[in-house]
Image: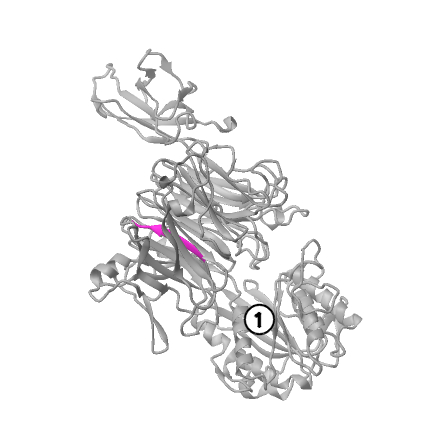
Amino acid sequence: MRQTTKSITLVSLFLLSLFSGMVIGTEQAEASQVVITEAVRIVDGGTASDSQAAVASDSEGNVHIVWSRNSQHLYYSMLSPRGETLIDATQITNPGLHKVWHPDMVIDENDRIHLVWSDKSGQHKIMYTSINPYLAPLDGMAAEDSAISVIDDTIISMRAQDRDWPSIAVDSQGNLHIAWQDSYDELQQFFNQPQIYYSMIQPEYSGGSVLTLFEDTLLTPIIGHKGHPDIVIDSNDLVQIAWDDTRGGKVELVFLVDTSGSMYSEWADVCTVIYGGNFAAGGYFQGLKPMLQEGNMTVYETIYGLGNTLPGAASSGNCAGKNQNAGPRSTALGITPGDDSGGIRKLPGTVYNGNTYSGYSGEDWGPGTNWACLSWKDAQGNVPGNPPTQDDHKWNPNATKIAIPISDEGPKDGDPSQQADDTTSIEEAHDNCVNAGVVPVGMYGQTYGGATSVQSHFKDLAQCPNGVQSTATRNCPGNTIRSTDAGGQVYEFPSGSGGASQMALLVEAMVYISTNNSREIYMSVLDPYGKMNNDPSWIPGVSGTVAQNGAYIEDTGKGSEGHLVVVNDTRVTIDDAYSFHPSIGVDMEGNTHIAWMDGRDYGFEKDVNYEVYYTKLRLQGAGEFDGRDDGLSTYAIKKIDDTPISNVETNAGLPQNAPWSGNSVFPSLLTDDQNQVHIAWVDSGNTSAGEELLYVRLNHTSLEGDGFTALDPWETVAITSWSSNKLGPNSGYKPSIGMPPAFSNDLGSGAHVAWSDTNKCNDETNNNRFTICYSHVLTGQVDVDFDAGETFYHVIEPGEQTIYNLTMNNSTPGPKDLVADSYGLNITGVPSNWTATLFFADNHTAIFPDTEIFLEGGESIRFYL
């Protein structure tokens, strides 16, 4: 235990008078500071890399940790409340080839452990197993998987496409609820964009199997990218699921299209992809704009033709009516309601080598992309930018910004490609796009002799230049602007005769690009027992969503009337910045608490610093639980507004040599039996440590509104103190891939936390290999109560005195010496002309505010007032 964080708690006794009556109230008090146990290294994996941990504790206070070893197998260990090893590292996945990712764990009331994870070997699977560690001797040695497994590795879902990020919760009847993200789409309507799925299973321990109560249920049947679900069960066995979602987001697409004669059929297909119609090669597509508008996403688009003339295809077919016959606009899209399309425009002037360039080939897509990025942030750092051209593109300030050059020839003046000026133009455009936060996405057409050299240019632009002609994925270490990944991708733009299959791939790529916009936090509520108990046609193993007549039909409505989804997709956040990784909890009063990482304090790009935000919701009373399509009102459910819990440095407060030091990411949230909220995350604010694991406790409050006034002041506590990589792998350019810290309640008002670390849980490095660390966060609690036979109400005459007999008990769960702490007693609220004094009952000595009272766990004292 770190004695430097030993706490002294002030316990307030409230004294009230009414004529000759006196009322005294007592309360349960909390430690004013937390105690962090020294980090324990769970396993010495040798040359192995151990990461992606989950943690839970049982009714005896023992701690259970699982993790992924080399992403190949799942391992398990059990610790006593003191941190002593009861079961050493034990492989609990079956022999064979696996790719284990993102495990999650829950413990039921009988101390059985339930685990889920994704297995990405072969066809992606969501897996489940259950173990009973008490079947092992608990002698500090490794156990046998076959000895402790009560339900062997079981496939929950395995179908076409990818799936990941499972989350599990257990209800009061011991049944299990699992949510995950999944790209399977029976009707092929969502172009492989991940959706949120749900399943409910009933363990059958006698047979070592599970009974599926609800099979794979699609909860989000609408276009868009959803991810990172978290699941919790409330006291009524209602299932609450939160996730991040591109609905409500904005994206701006700036196309820079080659206007040479070889690209005329591509022009027609660009309009078909954006606005809808028939492709030159045949086949109909609805169009990105109308499709995404149905999914509550806003797409701003402008199609620039390079040069001062546009081909006839820009005014005919599916492009008809879109040609503005003008250059760039003078105002941004989206500023005026309904103004969301820039149409087709000419781009007579681009930027090459820092100066205006006006080529005559119509093929200057390198300088054109450079111009588009400089239009948002120029070489002098101005936002919006002012490049050295007569006209600039006016970007919407709140949208995700994507520049899309399309060509079949070299980036400056066309073929031949791979010339010195081609390379210079791509390097310049890449660097300025990285600086501006505009993502370049290249689309190459086929040309005589093949497109390899042109595709290589596009790779250099979208990722990073590597000085070699190659179509391979670039290695971008990011130690300079030139070597930084610009965050884009490269796709083939088929010619008009490319065929339906190639056009389908193009559409899928364009949907991915267009839905790669900012995220919001959404949630939904399910009533599975309402469905099972009130629908006479229900049978185990059915799905809550079915495909009928080319559409998905969700089972929505009231649980009392036999429906599953009682609160449909409800938007929690309303902000144009990226919001990722929600973590959800429910307190004893039925309030919902969510923490997530949010970039709103630093801008609207994806690769910005993030802060940990928190909100408190009250779903009951905010509307009928009737499954209505638009869910509950965001404003009606909010009790505490979106509040940054981590320290907000702001862009102006970041040191120049540490631009990522404002990053606070990957939160985990818990609620305890006293309705307090616990949050842990990884933070980069301490530049000497690089990354720290931080912890905050938010006290219970009945106040509402702004978090800075509704919540008690909170203290951020560092769990770690050394410099290392924690909770990897993660990337500033891909904030969606990081793993939150493993986080679990203890028996009281503290928490267990585990994480992966490239140090040995101290200042000693681990050869850059991840290992698993564990700490116990002890917040402490103390009960002040009336002694046996005492009453809260005494009557005395003026000039008389009375005595209240009281007790104080250190009720913090855990080993008595580990949770021992010192406390103080203080009196507040004494009326004028009254006196109140505290005394120890055993020796009648006075207790002053600075009198230190030491209590081991479970120890109590008697005193009187």
Q: Quadrant of residue 537?
A: bottom left
Instruction: Name the quadrant of the C terminus.
Output: top left
Q: Main secondary structure of the magenta part?
A: strand
Judging depth in this view, the residue of 468 and 562 nearest the camera is 468
The amino acid type found where label 1 is placed reads Leu
Pointer 1 local density, CA inside 10 Å: few below 14, some 14–19, many at least 20: many
Would residue 381 appear left or right of 717 to someone viewing this image?
right
Locate residue 61, reporting x and y percent.
38, 36
Locate residue 597, reporting x and y percent.
50, 52
Q: Residue furthest right?
A: 420
Q: Quadrant of residue 735?
A: bottom right
Vertical placement of residue 38 versus 603, above or below:
above
Q: Is residue 150 magenta?
A: no
Would residue 546 appear left or right of 327 to someone viewing this image?
left
Q: Which residue is depicted at the point 68% across and 86% down?
A: 261
Q: Which residue is depicted at the point 50% across and 81% down?
A: 276
Badge 1 element: strand
Vertical placement of residue 75 versus 487, above or below:
above
Judging depth in this view, the residue of 796 and 66 nearest the camera is 66
Instruction: Say which residue label 1 marks.
Output: 253
Would residue 404 appear left or right of 842 to someone viewing this image?
right
Judging depth in this view, the residue of 865 and 717 nearest the camera is 717
Judging depth in this view, the residue of 254 and 288 nearest the camera is 288
Q: Which residue is depicted at the point 71% across and 64% down?
A: 465
Vertical placement of residue 11 versus 467, above or below:
above
Locate residue 8, reporting x and y percent.
44, 25
Please give the range of residues in magenta: 165-171
